[in-house]
Image: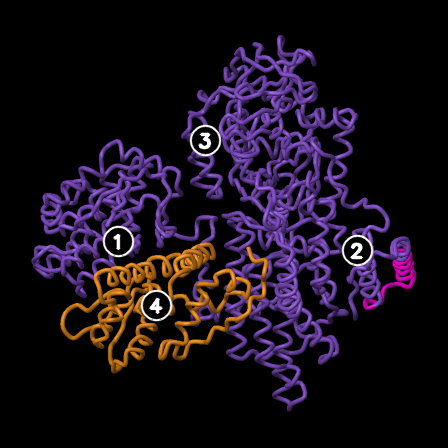
Chain colours: A orange, B purple
């Protein structure tokens, strides 16, 4: 929610000063603005901040890239933030693991806002994974490790440790 | 680019409309709903867009967005906001409304009601901005997306409340757009909608985030979701501190029912059954967790809640499988039953299953009660007589009951299908439909002949079944799979079901013309619950004809659901004698073994009678099986995971905490619980533990056994952290203030350990008892409450504290894996873990325990025995047991060592496996 928007602001090099509130049971972030009713929703505000920082490339350059980024932001707010039962989390990790099999970033070869928000959204999940699970979701682990070392992304969040050599050769 | 859409799928509407509105040059591909989705991320009824680059978009909104992007319309803050709102707020509510309309047949208005707030949100935004469209004066992607989601629910603007005038105008103008109209015509054809409806019916109902805490399917617990970030309120902390201070007085008074347990007026009377294991084989771990162990854990929980609880089970002994087994083993059916009933009872005793009564179905009560139900059904006109074409083996001079025939499955062509059910596809089969049938006894080819049978008239009973089911589902806890399986059974249409069979081993049919037949085992077996209770107490009717006072829980694996949710309730509803019907039907999924299935015939997997030969204590088995209880989805037993969980969760987390807490009391405070002066940190811990405790109750009340176990582990994790942060072992050496702090931390910790002993009792009764003895917890504290109170006050003396768990070594576990044949999934045939595992007639069961001398397996087994006995002796000595007892156990140890030496000596070339542990 609001907390990761603050992280994003810092990452984008924006001056502090935006005020965030939350709305409803799902604690949807709201950005208060001087003019008008403000903006509601994590992906909406995040995209707004990116444009404000003039880093539009983080939203993708071509129509295709833009749509793909949009799609993963939506996945983030509907699936990752939706139910977070153990089973849901398992499915998310499984899905992402398949998707990332042949990709460096969520949107392919470019680093985008989708990677940033997905990283923030999954941090609490990855922290709790066992070594075995990290190996099971190998592609997610590789991607996550990559993103957390991306300059300015991690900030005060804990560094999740990934082991380079495989421990369990007979993983299912 | 290719757009794949499924007719009938509502999400297809907006993408088609968007493609039309944005003039995107798409090639349409129509899919059926059941075809495999292109992307693993997309659901079958969701559209996908394949771009020329090979990229696949699976989110309908992103697809719509792409069409507009491609013609140069970039998203704005406002369109983004609408799309996000649609995806997170409107979509889930609209899906639920659509489900209610199509599946539950709710009328338009009721469905719209659920959307009320969201419709008002659109109305407000439109009128506040004063624009014609959602994001300005021209239509944008936002309009198409929101309209596309609303249209399948609303159909036309007249179903909108008239006060939403602006919304109505907008909706109408959208509906009139050519692109939208065309999309609606092609997607929402009546036939396609029907297809979508039938698809929906097979899905669990969508659950809105706002409805919660009522289902017994996994759902996020507040703690899990937010981890330690969950902020405790001041009230929570104050309440926890108050409860703590009340001490033992705050606990409910321990209540124990008189024996035999009978319903008590004014108490919660809980009757628990677990599916009756079929007598002719040895249950494997999957069977054990599926019914008896799950039911046992719940029964123990109920008793600790002071609920008046009766837990009954027994072996199901009649039927073809016993008769065929008897033929194979050259025994009479009764001899077979006697032999296996004892095996079952032994296994459950070893697993510490707390049946109030473990009986069997071959008793005179079974005959009386089954025949009574039959007579009543006959009198009330719920039985039909019909001629059946049945397979008859002329060589054996008998009509062949289902299990006496084998052949090729008519559905999936599996060649070893049984006459009643195919092991591969799980479908029920009518024996005459089998291709290439063979008589199981003589391998002759049977012929089809007519014979008379009796049928339970399920179609006629449906009018009684439906309202009862509705009521039971509304008030009881049925697992999602139980509801789903039952729903699909009813949807497929109920047919009359044959209740008689041409067998000898069964309850005789008391009707002229049928005296040479017996009841079909599925008519007969569930009646076993009643007759077993009757063998326990002659006042059994107070449990079974008392729905007003009694709450009935049935535990089973999912393959048994239809018999408990449809057929048996129909028998009882038809017999109409005020029977107690199931209130809560708790069905598990399947447990697999390593990467494959349990298979007795291939000697793969751990079976009940072998678990004790592994040297791993019963409580560790219980813990691990419950930890991976297939709750909501299949799970798999894995040796390495067992080792991991034992060493991490039990040894390092739970055992470590309880042991440290107790040891500190002994070492630093001479075995007396010290004075405690609570700081704000301690108070927060009390509140945190209370939250976990509440969660434990909430989950167990919904029979989410596996999830509740996590709460226990969570509490001990908090405890370990607490000790780690406060370092009482350092502070005890410090000044007065530090020593007082060490005392408080130790006192709080040992009280947490004391509560954990109670919470653990349903899961690990042996360990629970060990903690109780070590800490000398008073018996009247052994009761569950919703509060964490100080049960071991300052001055309480604890006993001798010793480690609760032992490390499992890699060598040991590897040896077990080899011995039980894991990790070689060469056989991919699906073998349901039905109660009726196929009789292992083809090959004799692989002898696992009776190996030849000199065999490495024997040496391994003996090595483990020696290690186990060695530990046992050490434990006894540590606990200062009586000398005579120690001597006796030492003698056993020496004998085992001798046997081991003998086994090794006979075949010196066999290398001795490393299994001994130092220490």
Q: Secondary structure at mark 2?
A: helix
Circle 2/circle 4 CB separation < 8 Å: no
Residue matched to label 2: B860
Circle 1/circle 3 CB separation < 8 Å: no
Residue matched to label 3: B489
The spot of residue B682 in percent (x, y) is 54, 76
Residue matched to label 1: B51
- Magenta part of the protein: which range? B878-898
Do circles 3 and 4 both sit on a common chain?
A: no
Which chain letter matches label 3? B
How far apart are the alpha carbons under marks 2 and 4? 52 Å
In the foreground, B237 or B134: B134
* In magenta stretch: residue B887: yes
How far apart are the alpha carbons under marks 2 and 1? 60 Å
Do circles 3 and 2 both sit on a common chain?
A: yes
Task: Tell me what residue is drawn at x 46 percent, y 34 percent.
Answer: B486
How far apart are the alpha carbons under marks 1 and 3? 42 Å
């Amino acid at each position: 929610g609001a907390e990761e928007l603050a992280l994003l602001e810092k990452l984008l090099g924006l001056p502090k000063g935006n005020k965030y509130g939350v709305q409803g049971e799902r604690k949807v972030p709201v950005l208060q603005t001087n003019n008008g009713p403000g903006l509601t929703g994590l992906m909406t505000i995040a995209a707004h901040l990116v444009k404000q920082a003039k880093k539009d490339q983080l939203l993708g350059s071509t129509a295709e890239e833009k749509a793909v980024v949009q799609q993963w932001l939506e996945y983030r707010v509907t699936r990752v933030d939706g139910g977070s039962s153990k089973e849901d989390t398992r499915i998310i990790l499984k899905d992402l693991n398949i998707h990332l099999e042949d990709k460096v970033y969520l949107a392919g070869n470019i680093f985008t806002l989708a990677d940033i928000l997905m990283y923030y959204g999954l941090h609490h999940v990855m922290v709790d994974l066992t070594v075995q699970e990290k190996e099971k979701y190998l592609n997610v682990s590789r991607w996550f490790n990559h993103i957390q070392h991306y300059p300015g992304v991690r900030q005060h969040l804990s560094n999740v440790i990934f082991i380079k050599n495989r421990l369990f050769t007979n993983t299912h | 680019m290719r757009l794949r859409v499924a007719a009938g799928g509502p999400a297809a509407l907006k993408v088609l409309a968007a493609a039309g509105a944005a003039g995107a040059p798409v090639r349409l591909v129509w899919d059926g709903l059941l075809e495999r989705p292109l992307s693993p991320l997309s659901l079958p009824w969701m559209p996908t867009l394949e771009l020329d680059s090979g990229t696949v978009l699976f989110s309908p909104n992103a697809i719509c967005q792409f069409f507009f992007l491609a013609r140069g319309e970039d998203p704005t803050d406002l369109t983004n906001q609408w799309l996000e709102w649609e995806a997170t707020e409107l979509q889930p509510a609209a899906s639920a409304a659509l489900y209610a309309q199509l599946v539950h047949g709710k009328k338009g208005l009721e469905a719209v009601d659920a959307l009320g707030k969201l419709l008002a949100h659109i109305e407000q935004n439109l009128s506040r901005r004063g624009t014609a469209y959602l994001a300005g004066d021209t239509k944008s992607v936002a309009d198409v997306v929101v309209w596309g989601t609303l249209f399948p629910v609303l159909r036309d603007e007249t179903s909108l409340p008239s006060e939403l005038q602006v919304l109505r105008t907008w909706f109408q103008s959208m509906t009139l757009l050519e692109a939208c109209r065309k999309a609606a015509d092609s997607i929402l054809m009546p036939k396609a909608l029907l297809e979508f409806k039938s698809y929906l019916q097979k899905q669990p109902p969508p659950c809105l985030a706002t409805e919660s805490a009522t289902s017994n399917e996994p759902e996020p617990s507040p703690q899990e979701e937010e981890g330690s970030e969950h902020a405790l309120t001041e009230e929570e902390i104050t309440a926890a501190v108050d409860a703590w201070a009340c001490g033992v007085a705050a606990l409910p008074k321990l209540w124990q029912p008189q024996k035999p347990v009978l319903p008590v007026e004014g108490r919660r009377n809980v009757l628990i059954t677990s599916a009756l294991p079929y007598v002719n084989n040895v249950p494997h771990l999957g069977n054990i967790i599926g019914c008896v162990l799950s039911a046992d854990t719940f029964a123990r929980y109920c008793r600790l809640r002071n609920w008046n609880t009766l837990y009954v089970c027994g072996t199901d002994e009649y039927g073809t499988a016993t008769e065929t087994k008897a033929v194979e083993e050259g025994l009479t059916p009764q001899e077979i039953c006697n032999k296996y009933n004892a095996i079952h009872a032994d296994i459950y005793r070893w697993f510490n299953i707390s049946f109030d009564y473990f009986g069997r179905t071959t008793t005179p009560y079974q005959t009386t009660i089954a025949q009574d139900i039959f007579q009543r059904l006959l009198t009330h006109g719920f039985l039909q007589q019909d001629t059946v074409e049945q397979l008859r083996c002329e060589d054996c001079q008998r009509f062949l009951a289902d299990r006496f025939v084998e052949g090729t499955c008519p559905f999936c062509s599996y060649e070893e299908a049984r006459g009643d059910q195919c092991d591969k596809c799980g479908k029920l089969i009518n024996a005459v439909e089998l291709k290439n049938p063979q008589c199981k006894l003589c391998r002759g080819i049977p012929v089809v002949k007519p014979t008379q049978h009796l049928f339970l008239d399920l179609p006629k009973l449906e009018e009684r079944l439906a309202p009862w089911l509705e009521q039971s589902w509304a008030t009881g806890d049925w697992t999602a799979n139980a509801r789903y399986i039952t729903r699909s059974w009813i949807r497929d249409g109920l047919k009359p079901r044959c209740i008689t069979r041409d067998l000898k081993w069964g309850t005789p049919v008391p009707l002229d013309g049928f005296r040479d037949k017996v009841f079909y085992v599925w008519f007969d077996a569930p009646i076993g619950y009643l007759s077993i209770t009757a063998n326990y107490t002659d006042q059994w009717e107070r449990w079974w004809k008392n729905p007003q006072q009694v709450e009935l829980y049935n535990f089973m694996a999912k393959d048994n659901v239809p018999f408990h949710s449809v057929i048996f309730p129909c028998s009882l509803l038809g017999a109409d004698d005020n029977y107690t019907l199931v209130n809560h039907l708790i069905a598990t999924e399947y447990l697999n073994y390593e990467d494959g299935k349990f298979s007795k015939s291939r000697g793969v997997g751990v079976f009940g009678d072998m678990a004790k030969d592994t040297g791993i204590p019963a409580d560790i088995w219980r813990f691990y099986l419950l930890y991976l209880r297939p709750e909501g989805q299949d799970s798999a037993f894995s040796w390495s995971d067992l080792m991991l969980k034992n060493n991490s969760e039990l040894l390092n987390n739970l055992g470590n905490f309880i042991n440290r807490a107790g040891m500190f009391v002994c070492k630093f405070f001479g075995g007396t619980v010290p004075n405690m002066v609570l700081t704000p940190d301690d108070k927060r811990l009390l509140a945190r533990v209370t939250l976990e405790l509440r969660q434990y109750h909430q989950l167990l009340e919904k029979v989410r056994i596996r999830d509740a176990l996590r709460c226990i582990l969570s509490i001990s994790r908090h405890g370990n952290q607490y000790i780690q942060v406060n370092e009482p072992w350092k502070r005890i050496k410090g000044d007065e203030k530090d020593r007082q702090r060490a005392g408080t931390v130790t006192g709080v910790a040992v009280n947490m350990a004391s509560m954990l002993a109670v919470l653990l009792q349903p899961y690990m009764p042996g360990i629970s008892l060990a903690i109780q003895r070590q800490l000398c917890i008073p018996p009247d504290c052994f009761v569950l409450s919703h509060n964490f109170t100080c049960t071991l006050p300052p001055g309480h003396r604890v006993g001798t504290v010793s480690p609760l768990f032992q490390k499992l070594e890699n060598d040991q576990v590897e040896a077990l894996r080899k011995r039980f044949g894991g990790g070689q999934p060469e056989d991919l045939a699906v073998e349901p873990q039905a109660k009726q595992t196929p009789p292992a007639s083809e090959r004799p069961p692989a002898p696992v325990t009776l190996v030849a001398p000199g065999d490495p397996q024997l040496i391994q087994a003996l090595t483990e025995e020696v290690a186990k006995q060695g530990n046992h002796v050490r434990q006894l000595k540590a606990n200062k047991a009586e000398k005579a007892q120690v001597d006796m156990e030492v003698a056993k140890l020496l004998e085992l060592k001798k046997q081991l030496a003998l086994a090794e000596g006979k075949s010196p070339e066999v290398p001795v496996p490393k299994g001994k542990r130092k220490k």
